[in-house]
Image: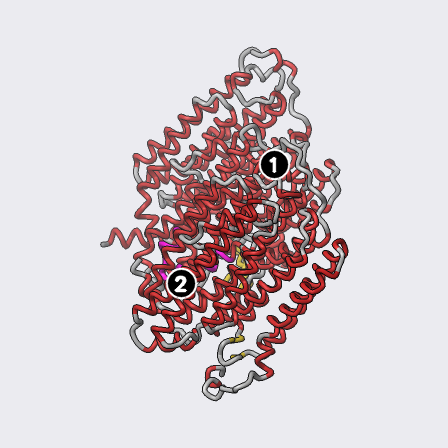
Amino acid sequence: MIMSAIPAYSPTLPLSADYVRILPEIVLSVFGMIVMVLEPLLDEETGQKLLALIALVGTAVGLGATWLMAQSPGLAFWNMVKVDGFSVFFHVLVIAIAAVVILSSYEYMAVQRIRAGEYYALILFGVVGMALMSSAIELVLIFIALEISSISSYVLAGFRRHEAASAESSLKYFLLGSFATAFFLYGVALMFGATGSTNIDQIGRSLQAGPIPLLASVAVALMFVGLGFKVAAAPFHIWTPDVYEGAPAPVVGFMSTAPKAAAFAVLLRVVFVINVHDLVWVIWVSAALSMTLGNVAALVQNNVKRLLAYSSIAHAGYLLVAFAAAPVLGASAAMFYTAAYATMNLGAFAVVSHFANAGERYVTLEDYEGLGRSSPLLAATLTIFLLSLIGIPMTGGFFAKFYVFSAAVKADLIWLTIIGVLNSGVGAYYYLRIIVMMYMRESRKEVPVTPVPFALGLALAACIVATLYFGVFPGRVLQNAQDSAGQLVEHAPPETPVSRLVSAF
Amino acid sequence: MNTDNLSPIILTLVTFAPLAGGLLLMLLPRRDRDIRIFALVITLLTFVLSLHLPVYFHRGQTGFQYGVDKQWVSTPNIHYHMGVDGISLWLVVLTTFLTPLCVLISWKSIHERVKEFFILLLILETALIGVFTSLDLFLFYFFWEATLIPMALLIGIFGHERKVYAAVKFFMYTMIGSVFMLAAILWLYAHTGSFDFVMIRDAIASGAVPKFPAAAQWLFLGFFLAFAVKVPLFPFHTWLPDAHVEAPTAGSVLLAGVLLKMGTYGLLRFNLGLFPEQSRQNAWWVMILALVGIIYGALVAMVQPNMKKLIAYSSVSHLGFVVLGIFSFTQAGLNGALFVMLAHGISTGGLFMLAGILHERRHTYEISEFGGLASPMPVYAASYLVIVLASVGLPLLNGFIGEFLVLSGAFQDKAVYGILGATGIIWSAVYLLWMYQRVFYGKVTHAVNNSLRDLSEFEKWAVWPCAAAALVMGVAPIIWLGAIDPAVQAALTPAVRVASRMVGQ
């Protein structure tokens, strides 16, 4: 239906429907600007609260706008934006992540004595970029969206201005990030050279027609480098632990979920729509490396933030396994994983950031000793998220891994699956270490735990409910992901070429 | 049968009653006495409910009874499919029988974090029952993994000196073993589109599964590894002594009594059920491992200075009998294997309780710390003797029947297996009776032992049911075997068919 509309569709001015199709982005930008304008006008105490509230309302209105957007699927702005189930899925995801992050950082900012007007604005602007990444099908627009999201992340990473570590984190993220984005841009340029188009759907169709030119393969490989950096997949993961360690904890929760989800959305389009199937081995190797390096390095970490950084590398690896699988199954498994991962990781970082206290003093494993006794509820909450990260039944993490690996088995990726399941066995150890510290060790030093404020409690409750919901009733979310993935790849060739090629492994 | 109208929901009731109790317990205030009474009531209620199963069981009828089959998740096709046959029936009852005893034995010995202890115990009971009742491979894996967390926490929080080491070791061994099973389950799902045990079994038997012959051996090994770690079969047994010695008494009882049976049950249900041909082909080395386990376990048990470790190694030896019986592929061997599973659950559960009682009084398990206990603790000594004799395999007590059947099955298969296995009985008499002699006979060697209290009321109520059950099982094994025999026969049929085909070639 959408496709048949293309030839007739060439207005000189955007239609009103076009604006509806980017309504969430518009709404979020407006709210971001309101926050920025109000920030200098308000005094410090009341201002913080109000700005956070405005930002929160912004995300709520953004979700409403997404609902409106979902009602009018189709192309917009001269085929640059495509609203389909896929982009709606990621819109909801990144905006919901932003809402949870705003809830969980309000108290953090107060404790760390950070004036945070721009903070909320930056989060909203970042979300604009990420949301746009999921609906853009024009590579140049994707690049712009990627930059919008990245630049806000760079600044957010340096928000603990007085800490050298935070500045280092921000600078490192910025330098390496721009380098990686350049790779992506290079890929776009080469792709244009190879196919004469920068529209993903058109590229996909023109490449299906005949043998794939080498230039196109190189282009996709370069784009993979750029996006691989954003999702922290090995071997482009080196920045992750340092950046996560230095950045403010709620920002890490944000950075490790929302931009990643958006980058995965782009990667899904690039991999499954452009569908250069002789590059499957690249994904295979990157997935295997990410899982193994991430898990092995996490085993020896003593800083919880670094530990979770390496764990996020490992999770990027599990996710990439889905990319090597067949289109519909693989894409839907990846989408489910992104959502499940976002809820559990956000929750874990929310607890970590609350517990870290002023100046982020309490972030080593030893600090968690005896937490199960001193604040049982907080410890139980963290335990649920850690169990989900391990992949224990009844949690979202379990079904996420399950779908990914079953998609891989279905595509005959037996070895990759075995590497994956072994890794998830190894990975259990370091999450378990945190649980052991909390429940089985007596605390040796005084670690003050302040009571959980209302906003954070709300954020944690949302994460727990989502994690358990994904774990007990995964059907609806998966069905949604599968429908969207079906729309995504409806022009991609059937499952055979990928699996045939991959079975050589 | 009109009184039978509970049957359609009885399995759900039995499985989830403890979990519901555990959730209610969370809401109860921290009054230790109330919590204990509540836990006891719940576990007794579960036991009474579970008695419905043998009472209304149609003996002589093969196939699964009390079946429930409802769709849980549509994609993938996961069903809430439960049912029991003569094999799993008694294991469920064994679980529900032992858990109230665990509550009684922990009445006085657990006095810190009482609430958490009983909540974990109840969750564990649900997971254990679920393992035996689920007929959907996914559901099975779900419960299988779900047993891990409460057990690891029971060991890690309530255990003795090296509890953390033991808990982590237990967790990692089982986790890594079971991920291979997950990979095998995923393969089966990918190629049959179903998780249903019965459906997959029939599909494999009729040769309807594509690519099965090439993968069969790997699938067999995938399942086998998970179960072998759990049994534990030599050389995967090294987690067991640590876990047992460090676990609290109730943990040891359930660990030895039920958790180990998950492994042998899995071998019988899944390895034999799904892969009869591969089981047959691999039987020779599995039986050798079982024999090594029987003899090695017994020899190591003999030289243990620590009573609990001695009992732990005796489990390695006894479970070797079970595996020997299963892989003998004879009616007698399989009947015996199941009977040993039940008898071992009762008698070793009893032994662990008795060892725990002693530990509570003297805070040590060292055999050399005791001697001549028969005079200060006559009732205790008499109870101990009954259980020891049951474990040794004295006729008219439960140990004898099972081991006799296993050995006669092994003889039918190959005489040398029977002969070597029979030495295991001699060894078990040596190490158990020698231990008994050192602990109870002669003069009191340590003055402090003169003032030891004899069994308290609670302890009597915990231990005597075991002794009574051991006697009843020894005198009237037909109550149990009547239901076991047809199920075993049904389980054996495909394997026998395979055998005759192999001979015919």
Same chain under badges 1 and 2? The reply is yes
SS assignment at label 1: loop
**Residue B319's image quarter?**
top left
Per the rendering, the mark at residue A325 is 2
- Counting from the top left corner in percent of width and height, residue B471 is at 55, 33
Identify the image quadrant of residue B296.
top left
Q: Foreground: A375 or A155?
A: A155
- Residue A416 among those drawn in magenta: yes
SS class of the residue under badge 2? loop
| Residue B260 position (above or below residue A71) | above
The residue at the point 61 percent across, 61 percent down is A122
The magenta segment is: A400-419
- With A62 as the anchor, is B281 left or right in this view? left
Q: Could you tell whether A178 is left or right of A70 in the image?
A: left
Q: Is residue A25 magenta?
A: no
Which image quarter is the C terminus of chain A in?
Answer: bottom left
To which chain does the residue with label 1 belong? A
Majority secondary structure of magenta residues: helix
Position in image of residue B202 (x %, y %): 40, 60
How would you rate the neighbour count of disc 1 (Cα within 10 Å): few for under 14, some for 14-19, many for 20 or more?
A: many
Q: Who comes first in sequence, dot 1 or dot 2?
A: 2
- Tell me if residue B140 comes above or below residue A135 in the rendering: above
Q: Type of residue at label 2?
A: Ala
Q: Residue B40 placed where, x, y %?
A: 68, 40
Q: Distance of mark 1 from mark 2, alpha carbons?
A: 41 Å
Which residue corresponds to mark 1?
Answer: A369
Q: Residue at x 76, y 56 (%)?
A: A43
Q: Is residue B460 above or below residue A315?
A: above
Q: Is residue B74 above or below residue A370?
A: below
